[in-house]
Image: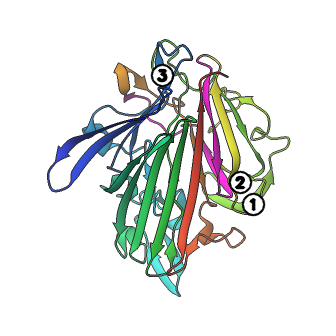
Amino acid sequence: MKIKKKLIKNDNQKIYSIEFENDNGFKIKFLNFGCYIQSIIIPYPDLKKSEDVIIGYENLKDIINDKSYFNSVIGRVAGRISNSFFILNKKKYLLSNNDKKNHIHGGTRGFNKKIWEIIKIVKNSNSISCLMYYNSADLEEGYPGNLKCFVEYQLNNNNQIIINYKAISDKNTLVNLTNHNYWNFNGHNKHYGNIYNHLALIKADKYCEINKKLLPTGRIIKVKGTKLNFNSFKKINPKVLKSSGIDNYFIQNKKNNQISKIAEVYSPLTKMGMTIYSNQPGVQFYSGNNMKSKYKGKKGKYYGVHYGLCFEPQKYPNAININNFPSIILKKGDIYNSKIKICLKNKY
């Protein structure tokens, strides 16, 4: 197991780049700015070459200025909140409306735009982990309560990336954190291209219907007989993505908070992919529909629409405003706990 830590910005607050490498040549590089994941490297089985399987940026300026939430922690609340307000504690809380009239992904300067304190880096024979901390002040982006937040990234010799989120507030508030990696298992070399060849599987029998504004309507629909049935591997091609693509919340087949498989995806070109496990009730699957037509990315490559896909394990979106959705309220003194396990593979 190897660690590299580098100071890349030194002013009022320091920004570090941290890279973990396991004994099998798998790597993750991330920053304490927004807990941004800059690269995830999967080696080919012969170890002679490798692929970076997330899209994103190489330089810090582009990372700081990004408006697509590439590869960062999302909070306080992932997804959209309709009309940018909610009622809690018998009080109306107004949020920043950064998605037309609605609020998305924690606001104008959500957790993805904050510098997190590096608490500790722990290395042992089988894993390396980094614990980061951020204190979100009362009424930041409109949310009540001082919220103490912890994010831990771990890489182990089973080629797993484990993400742990914890939070505690001094007032009743809303919390729904997630990871927003834009995956592309074609990599950045000779197989580089959009995601149309990827095959995906989602263990869900139901999904949340959305309206034209991409807000949940409250209706829960069975996936059987729809284009959103991913219970067996399905190619994410233009036929599946016709009209507006996919940006839906899939409800997992479970009744409690145990860690279970929720999704799997791979590229048949590189034979690289991942399986995601989570203790959350579902996953938001986003196929990069709203990406700009051109981004200057890594290794001299340019990205566009459908060049990345996101699997975002989380609680139900806009749950505070939909009565039949499970609550995302975190009560004063209670501990929010979310876990994501990403099992990487180079031999599909």
Side (left or right) of 308 relative to 218: left
Tag 2 near tag 1, CB within 8 Å: yes
Please tell me whether residue 120 is drawn above or below residue 175 in the rendered image.
above
Cα–Cα gap, marks 2 and 1: 6 Å
Q: Position of residue 46 (x, y in %)?
A: 54, 13
* In-front residue for pair 205/104: 205
Number of other residues with Cα within 10 Å of mark 3, as a class: few under 14, some 14 to 19, many 20 or more: many
Give the amino acid at mark 3. Glu
Residue reaching furthest to the right: 225
User: In percent of the image, x 55 and y 26: which residue is there?
Assistant: 185
Quadrant containing the C terminus is: top right
Q: Position of residue 88 (x, y in %)?
A: 53, 81
Please tell me whether residue 71 is drawn above or below residue 206 in the rendered image.
above
Quadrant containing the N terminus is: top left
Give the amino acid at mark 1. Arg
- Which comes before the other along the chain, label 3 or label 2? 3
Q: Which mark is residue 51?
A: 3
- Which comes before the other along the chain, label 1 or label 3? 3
Residue corresponding to mark 1: 219
Side (left or right) of 128 relative to 203: left
State which region is magenta: 270-297
| Color scheme of the displayed model | rainbow
Residue corresponding to mark 2: 209
Number of other residues with Cα within 10 Å of mark 2, as a class: few under 14, some 14 to 19, many 20 or more: some
296 falls in the magenta region: yes
Callout 1 secondary element? strand
User: In percent of the image, x 58 and y 18: which residue is there?
Assistant: 270
